[in-house]
């Protein structure tokens, strides 16, 4: 069994341990201990060069993006693909323009030439009289500008 004196010493030591853990707020003890410990700190590359960190990184990695741009396409596949896409776009644009030129600003009267065998009737009243007269065998084309009167539309459909 433990004697009372050894028991008191054990309780006292335990009390000190608890107090030290709780009273760790004393800064003077920690700083003295830290001063005595050797601090091994690796010197940074920019400190060795005698520059600030920002300028050292800018100088070291200034042209990384230019090197990476070319290193991504070793066999030229990406460039060939983009060239092919550009060629296809150019070809489709030319085809579209050529197609649109066929229908470019064609007016209905553009193809009409004076034909002595045909009769041309101008004006709303003249067209209405020609459609109602019944003297002509057939009508080839009806040209109008603006809204077409319903009477002319009905007669033209017959």
Image (cartoon, grey):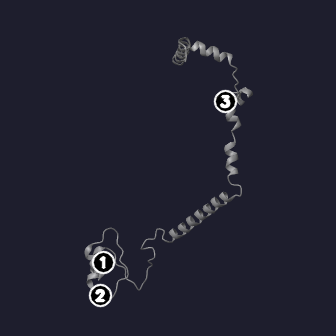
**Mark with earlier residue (1, 3):** 3
Q: Is residue 135 left or right of residue 49?
A: left
How far from the left and from the top, in percent, is residue 99? 52, 70
Identify the residue under disc 3: 53
**Marks 1 and 3 close (CB-CB < 8 Å):** no
In terms of image quadrants, where is residue 146? Answer: bottom left
Task: Looking at the picture, tell me which residue is in the foreground, 48 or 126.
Answer: 48
Mark 1 lies on a secondary structure that is helix
- Taking depth in this image into account, of 71 and 124 the one nearest to the observer is 71
Q: Nearer the viewer, mark 1 or mark 3?
A: 3
Which residue matches tag 2?
A: 135
N-terminal-most mark, 1 or 2? 1
In the image, residue 115 sits, relative to residue 59, either above or below, namely: below
Return the residue nearer the eye: 74 or 109.
74
Q: Identify the residue shown where x is 67% and y is 35%.
A: 58
According to the picture, the residue beneath numbered tag 1 turns out to be: 127
Q: Earlier in the sequence, mark 3 or mark 2?
A: 3
Q: Position of residue 80 (x, y in %)?
A: 67, 60
Decide: few, some or many residues near mark 3? Use Cα within 10 Å; few <14, some 14-19, many ≥20.
few
What residue is shown at x 34% (from left), y 75% (from top)?
A: 122
């Amino acid at each position: 069994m433990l004697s009372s004196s050894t028991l008191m010493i054990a309780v006292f030591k335990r009390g000190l341990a608890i107090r030290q853990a709780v009273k760790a707020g004393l800064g003077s003890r920690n700083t003295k201990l830290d001063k005595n410990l050797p601090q091994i700190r690796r010197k940074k590359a920019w400190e060795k060069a005698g520059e600030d960190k920002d300028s050292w990184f800018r100088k070291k990695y200034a042209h990384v993006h230019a090197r990476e741009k070319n290193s991504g396409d070793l066999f030229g596949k990406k460039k060939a693909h983009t060239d092919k896409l550009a060629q296809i776009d150019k070809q489709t644009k030319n085809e579209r323009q050529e197609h649109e030129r066929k229908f470019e600003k064609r007016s209905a009267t553009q193809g009409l030439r004076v034909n002595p065998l045909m009769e041309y009737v101008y004006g709303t009243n003249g067209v209405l009289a020609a459609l109602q007269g019944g003297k002509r065998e057939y009508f080839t084309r009806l040209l109008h500008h603006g809204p077409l009167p319903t009477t002319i539309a009905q007669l033209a459909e017959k």
